Image (spheres, helix red, strand yellow):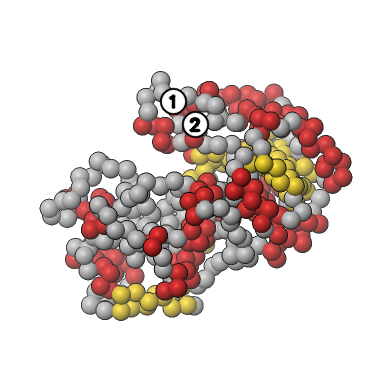
C-alpha cells in the first residue's frame, strides 16, 4: 500500500452536505485538516509480454492503429502484430518509438490506398498458423456528437470518414481466420441501423460467424467507464462463447470489484509533475471547485440542494465540470474535450497525459510521440489496452 495525502481545505468550497457525503465515502472524519488515502499502484510494463508474442504462431495485421491500444492488448494476449497502419504521422511515430513493436512493419497511409496483396510478402515470410485482422474504423460518423445534428445532416454510412467498407474489403481479400472490428457504442443507435445491417450482411456474404460484444471497459479491469462495441468474427462456429467479464460493482458478485482510479493515477500526483497545463483558471473555475468529487455541474443545481443553484440540471453536457472520485472508476476519456469538459482531477486541475494514459491502461514503459495535444488525442482515441487484451484473448479462443 502507498499513502496519498490530501488537504481538506481543497474541499472547503463544496457545500457542507455534499462535502460530508464525499468524506463519508472515503471513511474520513469531516473535521480532519490533512488525511491520507491508501492505494495500490496497479500500473504495469508491457515488455515482459514481448517474448511470448514474438514466438506466437497466431499473428495479426493492424489497421487504424492509432496510438497502439488495440495492438498492445493483442500482443499481451499472445498475438504477434506483423503490421500497423494509420494516416496520422504522430501515431505511426509513437508505434515506431516503442521497442514493443520493433518487429512490426509500420505504414503511414490511408486504408483506402491499401490492397490485400500489399501484405502477401510479409505473410509469406511469417507464415502464421492463424491470421487475424485488428481494427477500429474512425467512429465520428457514429459518435454521440452526431445526435445533436438533424437526421438530414448526419451522413452515417455515407460519411467519407466511414471506413468500415474499406476495412471489410481488405478482410474479404485476405480472408483471415478471424478479426475484430471495434467502434463506439452509439453505432447501435437507431440512426445508424442501416450501417449495422450492411455490416451484418457483408459478414454473412463473406462466410464469417460473429458475436457483437457491448463492452464496458470497467467490466474488464480498466479504471474507466467506457462503452464500446466489438464485432468479433471467426470462420468457425462460435456458439454461446463470449468474452469473460472479470470485474463488477454488484454487491455479492464473485467477480473482482471495479478498479479505483487512484490506484492508477495516484503515483503521478507529485510536486515535480506540476505544470501550467494543470490550471483551471477561467470562466468556470469558481464553479469547478464547488463540485464534489464524483459529480458534475448538476451538484451545483437546486435539484442537489445547492441554494441558490448556479446551473439548472439538464442544460449542459453531462461532462461539464465532471470531476473524478478517487475510489471510483474514471468516466470516459475523450480525445478532444471542450475547455470545461471533464473528467477533472479531484484536486481541481486538469488531468495530465500520463494520467490519461494510465486510465486507458497504457503501460508505464510505453511512450508517445507528438505535441501534448496530439498525445492527448492518441490516448483518447485508443482502445484501453486491458480491454483490448480481453477481446483479443476471446478472438484467439474462437478461431
The reply to whether discs 1 and 2 touch (Cβ–Cβ < 8 Å) is yes
The numbered mark at residue 71 is none
Q: Residues within 10 Å of mark 1 (few under 14, many from 20)?
A: some
Q: Secondary structure at mark 2?
A: helix
Residue drawn at x 37%, y 28% as measured from the top left: 149
Question: Which residue is the extreme one toward the top?
Answer: 152
Q: Between 9 and 392, which is closer to the camera in this rendering?
A: 9
Q: Residue 277: which quarter of the image?
A: bottom left
State whether residue 117 appears in this view.
yes
Residue drawn at x 42%, y 36% as measured from the top left: 144
| Vertical comparison of 29 with 207: above or below | below
Q: Which residue has dot 1 on it?
A: 154
Q: Which residue has dot 2 on it?
A: 141
Q: Position of residue 216 (x, y in %)?
A: 50, 48
Q: Position of residue 90 (x, y in %)?
A: 59, 48
Q: Earlier in the sequence, mark 1 or mark 2?
A: 2
| Vertical comparison of 345 with 338: above or below | below
Amino acid at each position: 500500500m502507498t499513502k496519498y495525502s490530501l488537504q481538506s481545505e481543497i474541499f472547503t468550497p463544496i457545500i457542507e452536505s455534499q462535502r460530508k457525503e464525499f468524506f463519508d465515502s472515503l471513511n474520513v472524519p469531516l473535521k480532519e485538516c490533512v488525511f491520507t488515502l491508501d492505494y495500490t499502484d496497479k500500473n504495469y510494463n508491457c515488455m515482459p509480454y514481448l517474448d511470448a508474442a514474438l514466438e506466437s504462431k497466431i499473428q495479426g495485421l493492424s489497421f487504424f492503429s492509432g496510438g497502439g491500444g488495440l495492438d498492445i492488448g493483442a500482443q499481451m494476449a499472445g498475438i504477434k502484430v506483423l503490421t500497423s497502419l494509420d494516416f496520422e504521422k504522430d501515431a505511426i511515430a509513437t508505434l515506431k518509438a516503442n521497442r514493443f513493436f520493433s518487429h512490426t512493419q509500420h505504414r503511414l497511409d490511408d486504408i483506402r490506398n491499401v490492397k490485400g496483396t500489399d501484405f502477401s510478402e510479409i505473410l509469406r515470410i511469417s507464415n502464421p498458423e492463424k491470421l487475424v485482422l485488428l481494427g477500429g474504423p474512425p467512429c465520428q460518423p457514429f459518435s454521440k456528437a452526431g445526435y445533436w445534428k438533424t437526421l438530414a445532416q448526419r451522413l452515417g454510412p455515407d460519411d467519407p470518414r466511414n471506413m468500415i467498407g474499406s476495412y471489410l474489403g481488405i478482410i474479404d481479400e485476405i480472408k483471415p481466420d478471424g478479426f475484430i472490428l471495434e467502434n463506439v457504442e452509439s453505432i447501435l443507435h437507431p440512426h445508424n441501423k442501416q450501417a449495422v445491417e450492411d455490416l451484418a450482411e457483408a459478414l454473412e456474404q463473406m462466410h464469417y460467424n460473429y458475436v457483437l460484444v457491448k463492452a464496458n471497459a470497467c467490466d474488464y479491469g480498466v479504471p474507466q467507464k467506457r462503452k464500446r462495441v466489438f464485432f468479433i468474427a471467426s470462420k468457425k462456429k462460435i456458439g454461446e462463447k463470449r468474452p469473460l467479464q472479470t470485474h463488477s460493482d454488484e454487491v455479492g458478485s464473485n467477480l473482482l470489484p471495479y478498479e479505483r482510479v487512484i490506484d492508477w493515477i495516484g503515483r503521478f500526483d507529485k510536486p515535480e509533475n506540476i505544470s501550467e497545463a494543470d490550471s483551471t483558471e477561467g470562466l468556470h473555475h469558481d464553479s469547478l471547485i464547488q463540485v464534489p468529487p464524483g459529480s458534475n455541474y448538476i451538484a451545483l443545481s437546486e435539484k442537489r440542494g445547492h441554494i441558490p443553484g448556479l446551473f439548472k440540471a439538464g442544460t449542459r453536457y453531462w461532462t461539464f465540470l465532471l470531476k473524478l472520485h478517487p475510489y471510483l472508476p474514471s468516466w470516459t476519456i475523450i480525445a478532444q474535450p471542450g475547455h470545461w469538459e471533464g473528467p477533472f482531477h479531484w484536486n481541481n486541475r486538469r488531468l495530465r497525459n500520463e494520467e490519461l494514459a494510465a486510465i486507458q491502461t497504457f503501460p508505464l514503459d510505453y511512450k508517445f510521440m507528438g505535441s501534448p495535444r496530439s498525445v492527448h488525442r492518441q490516448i483518447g482515441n485508443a482502445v484501453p489496452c486491458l480491454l483490448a487484451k480481453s477481446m483479443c484473448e476471446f478472438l484467439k479462443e474462437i478461431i
